[in-house]
Image (spheres, rainbow, N blue to C red):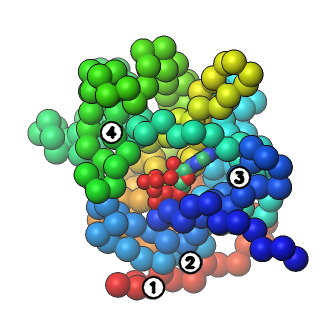
Amino acid sequence: MARRKKIYEGKAKTLYEGPEPGTIVQYFKDDATAFNAEKKAVIEGKGVLNNLLSEYFMTGLNNIGVPTHFMKRLNMREQLVRSCEIVPLEVIVRNYAAGTMAKRLGMDEGTQLPRPIVEYCLKDDALGDPLVTEEHIAAFGWASQQDMDDILSLALRVNDFLAGVMYGVGIRLVDFKIEIGRVFEGDFQRLIVADEISPDSCRLWDIETGQKLDKDVFRRDLGNLTDAYTEVATRLGVMPKGATPMIRPTLIN
Ligand SMILES: Nc1ncnc2c1ncn2[C@@H]1O[C@H](COP(=O)(O)OP(=O)(O)OP(=O)(O)O)[C@@H](O)[C@H]1O
Ligand SMILES: [Mg+2]
């Protein structure tokens, strides 16, 4: 069998050349990182859960007319996606104050925001993905004004969809991050939701108890991350039937 070409090895995923031009295979690793990769661990089963959860959210978005890169899941760790040019921004949507926003503005975590607030960070690990304004984005040409209008509308549609899906299973969508990709169709470019949507990139709190079911469990040492993600997957009916219990995490650094 021919060896496939690795395109990119990221912190959480590896990208391989896909079977057709314009496609990519996204392999979900078990690696977890936080605080710009200062904290690292391998968490058995995380890749499988994120692959299944991202498939679930992206399929739902495709079905309601929010375009995403997702084409199909190939196996428990891999999915076929449309290759795109990633806009160098992390697009964050917040419904409740938490994390860096709560810290920056001196707000209590969990404070409901008057409306969803969208923030942009420059995708640059060396700089720690700094917060940028639309002024920076326009002046440095990271995205056009038309792109920004489209990105805002995509982000808010994803927010309404995800918040609704989560509410249905008793989970509060506190915030999330997405990445946007450009695809070219003839003379036109279109923006689509790319990368992943999973508990790695969302804050998810149980509505009743406030229990955290996302990557903060790892960032803040609040318990077993796989158990938290399994809880989300089980509530959404995404857990594969008869899945074997996950092995406990091992710290590697
Ligand atoms: N459809 C796509 N086409 C091309 N690149 C993609 C696509 N979807 C996601 N990517 C990129 O693939 C990489 C996924 O790997 P991973 O999430 O592990 O990266 P990372 O370590 O977080 O690094 P980065 O800072 O680049 O996001 C990211 O760089 C992401 O921007
Ligand atoms: Mg990433």
Residue at point 63% right, 23% down? 189
The CA distance from mark 1 to mark 4 is: 31 Å
Residue picked out by circle 2:
44
Ligand 1 under 8 Å from disc 3 Cβ = yes
Circles 1 and 2: CB distance less than 8 Å?
A: yes
Q: Earlier in the sequence, mark 1 or mark 2?
A: 2
Depth-wise, is mark 3 or mark 2 nearer the camera?
Answer: 3
- For badge 4, the amino acid type reads Cys
Q: Earlier in the sequence, mark 1 or mark 4?
A: 4
**Residue 121 has which mark?**
4
**Residue 250 has which mark?**
1
Q: Where does the image place residue 61, in percent across and percent down from the top left?
A: 67, 33
Dot 3 alpha-carbon crowd within 10 angstroms: few under 14, some 14 to 19, many 20 or more: many
- For badge 1, the amino acid type reads Thr
Depth-wise, is mark 1 or mark 4 nearer the camera?
Answer: 4
Dot 2 alpha-carbon crowd within 10 angstroms: few under 14, some 14 to 19, many 20 or more: some
Depth-wise, is mark 1 or mark 3 nearer the camera?
Answer: 3
Ligand 1 under 8 Å from disc 1 Cβ = no
Q: Earlier in the sequence, mark 4 or mark 3?
A: 3
